[in-house]
Structure formats: structure tokens, C-alpha cells
Amino acid sequence: MSEPLILCENLVKIYKLDEIEIVALRGLDLTVQTGEVMALVGAIGSGKTTLLNVLGGLDCPSAGKVIVAGNDLLKLSDVQLDRYRRQYAGFVWQQKARNLIPYLNVEQNVELPMIMAGVDARERRERAGELIDAVGLSHRRNHRLTQLSGGEQQRIAIAIALANRPMLLLSDEPTGELNSHTAKTIFEIFHHLNRTYGLTVMIVSHDLQIARFVDRMVAIHDGKTSSETRRVEAEAVDPVNGDNATRGHVFEELVMLDSAGRLQIPKEIRERYNIGDHIRMEETPEGLVLRPVASAAPVIKRLDKPDEPPEKPRGIKKWMNLLQR
């Protein structure tokens, strides 16, 4: 297998606010191959956007290992990071205004990153026209942003992100402000660009339904990758004919192990099976079986102090004992 485009091993990111340290990534491990269309999902605060910012060169990791297209992001200088952001990673945001300049038309918006990179005018026009056509908006190239719908603006934002031919497209909740029909169009464009340019696409989302639109979905809990969901082909019996099998997709969720062989068991599963700090692992002919361990505090008898004599009866208890003799 070829070298992965993205390799994260024991990746740590710590933010410091005054005297408080916030650990956003806690030894995260992740591998992404060139040409994948994948999603990162997780609750708010799980670390998914932090990971996206680290991979895009917008945040510096605190420790661990993160390599993107042969670039060791922990070792790059500020100048090298600027070059990395221009050449290797493109960003698409949920807030379209972060990508778009309102007083420029569509073509001028797409050309702007190339102007800043020093690309000559003829190449800029050719590249801009190619990308505008790739997102299906060649008929809108001279329109201002106020003349475009929200979905069209997001498609132009994708074209802008690809202006300088990055290998990696990072997208943070790109369909969060769009309806379901327009969102489906955006995902179709991602796959079209993936096939056309060999582009690797990583999408951050909180919606688990995104698994239907990507090659695989990786869940992040508490700053670490915990599970991976893939689409796999499966045969199903035709309910009408009974014996004619049809092929379709099912989703398979797998628990992910880190580089040390550790796994994360989600909190809701631990609570459901009453799993505490320990778990029993048994090797059987069918495979490995994990069983919860009953949590019982050990009984410890102190040997350094003799047992105290029973308390002598007093008051009315003393008189009742005397009467019973």
C-alpha cells in the first residue's frame, strides 16, 4: 500500500486560556489515503474542528505526529506553513462569507487566490473557467454574489478553495445552512471533483446521515478517534420473486484501535453494560469476547490495630439486661 496522504499518531492539541488548559485532542490516531472522500463526525467539543484546523495548518499541534503529503506539520516554520496552506490544503466553511468577496463577481472571486499566489493572467482565467464549469456554474461566471442562491455561493466557495490546486479539501459543515436537496448537490460535486482531480476530501459534520455520501465516516469522542463506519455491498433477496438477489449498500461500524492497541468504548455502551474501570477479554474459537467485570470494593481487614471490644450497655439497656437474668 502507498504512503497515506494524512498520518496522525498520538496527536495532541492543548489550548491555554489564561491559566486554564483545554485538551482538545488526546493522542488521536488517523490515517487517510489519497483520493478518499471521508467524514469526521462527533458532538460539539469532540475535537473534530480542531483536527481540521491542524491538518489545514491553521493551528499548530502541541505534541505527537501529523504528516500531510510528506509535510511534517510539527517541524514547519511560519514561512513553510504559509506555503503549505497555499499549496496543499483548501478550505470550505459553513459560513460562505469566509470564502467570498461580495463586491467581486464569480470569476473574480475564483481568480483572487491565484492573483495572491502570483499566477499569470492567462493561466488564472483558464483555471477559473475550468473550476466554475466543474461546479456547474459556467452560466453564472459574471454574476455578483447577491444574484446567487445560498447553494450556488457554496459551490463557488468550493471552486475558490481549489484555485491553487491543493491535494486536500477540508470542509467544515459545508451543508449546515442548506436544505437537503441542495446539500445532496454539494456532496455530488465533492465526488465529481474527487474523480476529476484525484482530490482527497475531508468533511466535518455532526450529522450521522453523512455516511450515505462518503466512503467512510470516522467518529471522534473526547479528542480521540473511536469508531469507523464504512459502506459495504450486500446481497438482498427480492421480496417479490424471492430467489432473485439484488445488490445494495449496508453500513458497518467498527471500533478503532490506537497505535498502542487501545480502544474507546462509548459512554452510552459502558453504561448499558455496566462497564466500570475494568473489562475482561477472553479469546474464544469465534474471536475475542469482551465482558464487563462486576465492580465490588475489596474487603480489607486492618492488622495493625486489634479489634475493639463491644460497647457495654448503658442506661435503660443495662437495667433491661439485669431484669432478664
Image: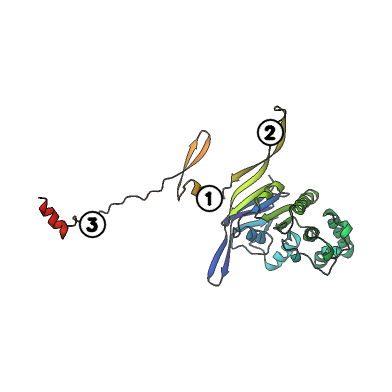
Q: On the image, numbered disc 3 is attached to which residue? A: 305
Q: Is residue 255 above or below residue 144?
A: above
Q: Secondary structure at mark 2?
A: strand
Q: Residue at x 53, y 36 (%)?
A: 287
Compared across the picture, whether 130 is left or right of 200 comes to right
Q: Position of residue 50 (x, y in %)?
A: 63, 61
Q: Is residue 262 visible?
A: no
Observer-nearest of 109 and 118: 109
Above or below, 107 relative to 277 = below
The image position of residue 269, as x and y in percent, is 52, 48
Mark 3 crowd level (few <14, some 14–19, many ≥20, 10 Å Cα): few
Q: Earlier in the sequence, mark 1 or mark 3?
A: 1
The secondary element bearing badge 1 is classed as helix
Which of the image's four quarters has the N terminus?
top right
Marks 1 and 3, Cα distance to the nearest angstrom? 44 Å
Dots 1 and 2: beta carbons under 8 Å?
A: no
Percent across and percent down for residue 244 are 72, 28
Q: Earlier in the sequence, mark 1 or mark 2?
A: 2
In the visual, does 11 lie left or right of 95? Answer: left
Q: Earlier in the sequence, mark 2 or mark 3?
A: 2
Residue 185 higher or lower than 145, as above or below: above
Alpha-carbon neighbours of circle 2 within 10 Å: few (<14), some, or many (≥20)?
some
Label 2: which residue? 236
Residue 55 — which label?
none
For the residue pair 154 and 177, the one nearer the viewer reads as 177
As shown in the figure, which amino acid type bears the numbered disc 3?
Answer: Lys
Disc sitting over residue 268 in the figure: 1
Q: Residue at x 69, y 52 (%)?
A: 5
Q: Does 160 sit left or right of 121 as displayed?
A: left
Extreme-bottom residue of the structure: 18
Task: Confirm whether residue 13 shows in the render.
Answer: yes
